[in-house]
């Protein structure tokens, strides 16, 4: 088998790394990949991002199947295009991707089908939006309807912040088309969990649960980022809660999409808030795996992932059982100077330790210049440690990090702490 992974982040490195371990797989191509995937055994970078050129590549090289990591190609219709050319690809169609690309679509679907989520209203008129937050009070959450590169959600602690967010999106159009409609949503308290599943159109196979740390600074402070680290398993997801999330959120969503004529295939990521009584509510859906959640999840997945994807593509996920390493994986992101505002590029990266069974460094914003690794994006590396306890997994990851160096490197020293309850 030859497989193609589309994307260039740590998530795609981890997917490719796992697929390359499959005894059936002879080559994993990554388009466009990064400095780490270029160096990884069994992985081959392909410098293509245009969707038609990717389909040409898959056809020419007789790729068995393609897996898409990032949302942009999905929203751009890569699955529609590949299918129209009879090329096997795992991901949702452009139309089904609305679950992520339009928050109004996702909220309306959840409301119609009784899927638990925060109370909300959608506005395109600024005056009505201002009046609504005045009536509801703070804290309150303002969300741009469309994809806004992580800048579209304002969790307003005060009315003033809420009014500013409305003004920024609806009056000043700072987020462009993404902000022409806003969702104003009830503020939910609790613990956030990433619940990711694979869907073959009909059957659903849950991956291991995980939690990420979205804020830049220790103690969950500072600005939101794409994620500064993640761990799996999430101890808050008991078997009972897992069953409830499947029953109340995941399966009804997959059925709702089918009823709407938008049959869902691909990874489906539900961002959930679990309240103090253990009730789950949906914060958002993503039509892809999480980054950095994928890195610890892949580290724990046992067996042949290519076999699982083959079943996902033939609609037989109901015949597959995933086996997980019972150990905990903790992944710590090393970010560039000035991430997330204006990450600096071009810093030389030194001393990445060799991969072992218990520690792997997945690359994201790295590239090779004259054969040397340099930074090329905000989140540069994700170092994952695997061990019997959260504390041991942390110490393995942090020990590896001590040897790594690039100028301006920043990371949180408390990844995994929520699993140890140290922030409560
Ligand atoms: P989203 O892109 O919708 O997941 O929002 C980004 C982040 O904002 C989430 O990961 C949460 O931390 C936070 N958030 C979103 N919606 C709410 C809500 N209704 N209540 C509290 N926090 C929220
Ligand atoms: N780590 C959050 C995300 O992938 O959206």
Image: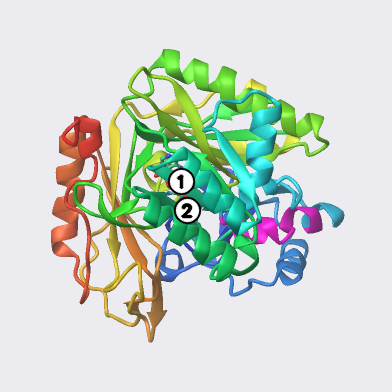
- Residue underneath mark 1: 141
Numbered label attached to residue 379: none
Q: Residue at 49% of width from left, 50% of height from top?
A: 142
- Of callouts 1 and 2, which one flags the residue occurring earlier in the amino acid sequence? 1
User: Residue 3: image x %, image y %?
Assistant: 63, 54
- Residue underneath mark 2: 153
Q: Is residue 261 magenta?
A: no
User: Residue 56: image x %, image y %?
Assistant: 77, 68
Q: Residue at 68% of width from left, 57% of height from top?
A: 75
Mark 1 vs mark 2: in front: 1
Above or below residue 405? Residue 157 is: above
Q: In terms of image quadrants, where is residue 275?
A: top left
Is residue 289 visible to the viewer in this orientation of the structure?
Answer: no
Is residue 64 visible to the viewer in this orientation of the structure?
Answer: yes
For the residue labelled by badge 2, is the local secondary structure a helix, a strand or a loop? strand
**Secondary structure of the magenta portion, mostly?**
helix
User: Residue 302: image x %, image y %?
Assistant: 43, 33
Q: Please report the bounds of the magenta region as a residue range.
A: 70-81
The residue closer to the viewer here, 92 or 189, is 189
Q: In terms of image quadrants, where is residue 82?
A: bottom right
Q: Does ligand 1 reach within 8 Å of label 2's beta carbon? A: yes
In terms of image quarters, where does ligand 1 lie?
top left
Q: Is residue 239 left or right of residue 315?
A: left
User: Residue 375: image x %, image y %?
Assistant: 34, 75
Asked if labels 2 and 1 touch by Cβ distance under 8 angstroms, the answer is yes
Q: Is residue 377 left or right of residue 122?
A: left
């Amino acid at each position: 088998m030859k497989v193609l992974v589309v994307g260039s982040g740590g998530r795609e490195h981890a997917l490719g790394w796992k697929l390359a371990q499959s005894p059936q797989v002879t080559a994993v191509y990554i388009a466009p990949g990064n400095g780490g995937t270029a160096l990884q055994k069994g992985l081959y970078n392909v410098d293509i991002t245009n969707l038609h050129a990717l389909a040409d590549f898959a056809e020419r090289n007789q790729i068995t199947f393609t897996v898409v990591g990032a949302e942009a190609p999905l929203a751009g219709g890569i699955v529609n295009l590949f299918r129209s050319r009879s090329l096997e690809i795992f991901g949702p169609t452009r139309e089904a991707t609305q679950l992520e690309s339009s928050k109004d679509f996702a909220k309306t679907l959840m409301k119609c089908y009784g899927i638990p989520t925060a109370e909300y209203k959608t506005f395109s008129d600024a005056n009505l939006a201002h009046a609504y937050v005045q009536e509801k009070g703070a804290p309150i959450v303002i969300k741009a309807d469309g994809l806004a590169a992580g800048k579209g959600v304002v969790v307003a602690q005060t009315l003033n912040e809420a009014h500013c967010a409305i003004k920024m999106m609806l009056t000043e159009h700072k987020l462009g088309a993404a902000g022409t409609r806003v969702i104003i949503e009830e503020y939910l308290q609790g613990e956030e969990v990433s619940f990711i599943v694979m869907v073959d159109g009909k059957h659903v196979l849950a991956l291991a649960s995980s939690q990420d740390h979205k804020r830049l600074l220790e103690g969950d402070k500072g600005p939101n980022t794409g994620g500064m680290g993640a761990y799996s398993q999430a101890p808050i997801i008991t078997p009972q809660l897992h069953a409830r999330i499947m029953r109340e959120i995941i399966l009804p969503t997959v059925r709702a999409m089918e009823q709407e004529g938008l049959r869902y295939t691909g990874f489906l990521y539900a961002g959930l808030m679990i309240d103090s009584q253990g009730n789950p509510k949906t914060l958002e859906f993503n039509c892809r795996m999480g980054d950095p959640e994928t890195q610890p999840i892949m580290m724990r997945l046992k067996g042949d992932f290519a076999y699982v994807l083959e079943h996902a593509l033939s609609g037989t996920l109901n015949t597959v059982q995933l086996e997980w390493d019972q150990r905990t994986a903790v992944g710590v992101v090393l970010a560039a100077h000035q991430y997330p505002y204006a990450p600096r590029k071009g810093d030389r990266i030194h001393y990445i330790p060799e991969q072992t069974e218990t520690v792997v460094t997945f690359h994201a914003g790295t590239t090779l210049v004259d054969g040397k690794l340099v930074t090329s994006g905000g989140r540069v590396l994700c170092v994952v440690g695997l061990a019997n306890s959260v504390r041991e997994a942390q110490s393995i990851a942090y020990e590896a990090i001590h040897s790594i160096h690039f100028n301006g490197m920043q990371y949180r020293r408390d990844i995994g702490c929520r699993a140890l309850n140290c922030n409560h």
